[in-house]
Image: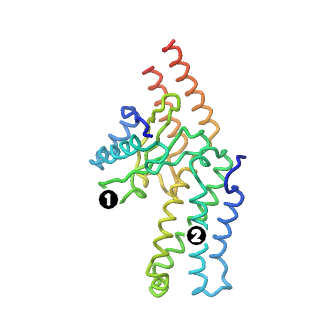
Amino acid sequence: MGCPVSVSVKSMERSLSRLRKSFPRVDGDIAGLYEDISKTSHQTAGPAKAVPGYSMTVWKYRCESTDMGRGKSGGLRVLAFYYKGGDVLFPFLVYIKKDFEKEPGEQPSKKIIGKHLEELFSEVLSRG
Amino acid sequence: MGAYAIPISQLKAESSFAVSWQEISSIPSWFRKPLSLWILSKAFRIVNQSITNEMLGSLTASEALDLHQSFSELHAAGSRLLDRLESQYLLKNFLLDHFFINQMTEELTKLEDIIEALAWGGDDQLRAFIDGAVADIESTQRSLSA
């Protein structure tokens, strides 16, 4: 069963607007991923990978970049937080794989992730 | 440590066995390369099929770090071998018109996806922060619905 995706997270919107300058079709690419998640499941779309150690609350997705024409493996990465209580997925960061990858598989630092999560949580709390 | 379908120690052992094959210089190269391809492909399949989201989600910080290191070495060995084969036309044709090579490239991509997930997983501070934030959200929702 599909999972609703919250599309108006500020930190996600900011990282998207940064990418729009170089990748004008990024919104369409991300919309395709969201559609996949809401039709299937946040655990299978993407293909999804649970990030270890967070009780399956933090997820990573691969998404094709039509601007780069490189398919999912060299394309976009989306990080999202799954709130079990409300069965909602909150994407909070999108980036290009090569932006952080000096070694194969290297990812944004924990500091960057923590900063984005902090912003996401305060936003969710303020919404009530 | 959690109980998994294939124990972490076995996944690590499969991984380091596959990596070590490439380094054995006493075996002639024409035989070692196809054999390495087969052994590495087998290790990739075992790892890719064993590491489920349930397993990833329940790994501890030290397990994630441990597997990240092992799988990064395995990934590097696979990439090295593919690079070497790229320049050897006869050997490439022998490997059933690239069939095995394509299959290995596909498995290598899947492994890379797992390595990415392992890269920053299991940070205790971040975990405590997430748990605290989730508790705050839940308590806010409870007080709003009360």
Residue at the far top in the pictured view: B146
Establish if B74 lies above or below A4.
below
Amino acid type, label 1: Gly
> Residue B77, which numbered label?
2
The residue at which mark 1 appears reads as A69
Model colouring: rainbow
Residue at the far left in the pictured view: A24
Q: Position of residue A13 (x, y in %)?
A: 36, 36
Left or right of A94, for residue B107:
right
Q: Nearer the viewer, residue A90 or A103?
A: A90
**Mark 2 and mark 1: Cα distance apart in space:** 27 Å
Q: Where is residue B116 in the image (x, y as percent from the top left)?
A: 53, 53
Q: Label 1 crowding class (10 Å Cα cut-off): few <14, some 14-19, many 20+?
A: few
Establish if A100 lies above or below B29.
above
Which image quadrant is residue B115 in?
Answer: bottom right
Amino acid type, label 2: Ala
**Disc 1: host chain:** A
**Disc 2: host chain:** B
Q: Label 2 crowding class (10 Å Cα cut-off): few <14, some 14-19, many 20+?
A: many
The total of numbered circles placed on residues is: 2
Q: Where is residue A60 in the image (x, y as percent from the top left)?
A: 48, 46
Q: Which of A5 and A127 is in front in this view?
A: A5
Left or right of B141, for residue A37:
left
Query: Is label 2 in contact with label 1 (beta carbons under 8 Å)?
Result: no
Q: Which residue is drawn at 48% across and 32% down?
A: A87
Q: Which residue is drawn at 51% across and 64% down?
A: B108
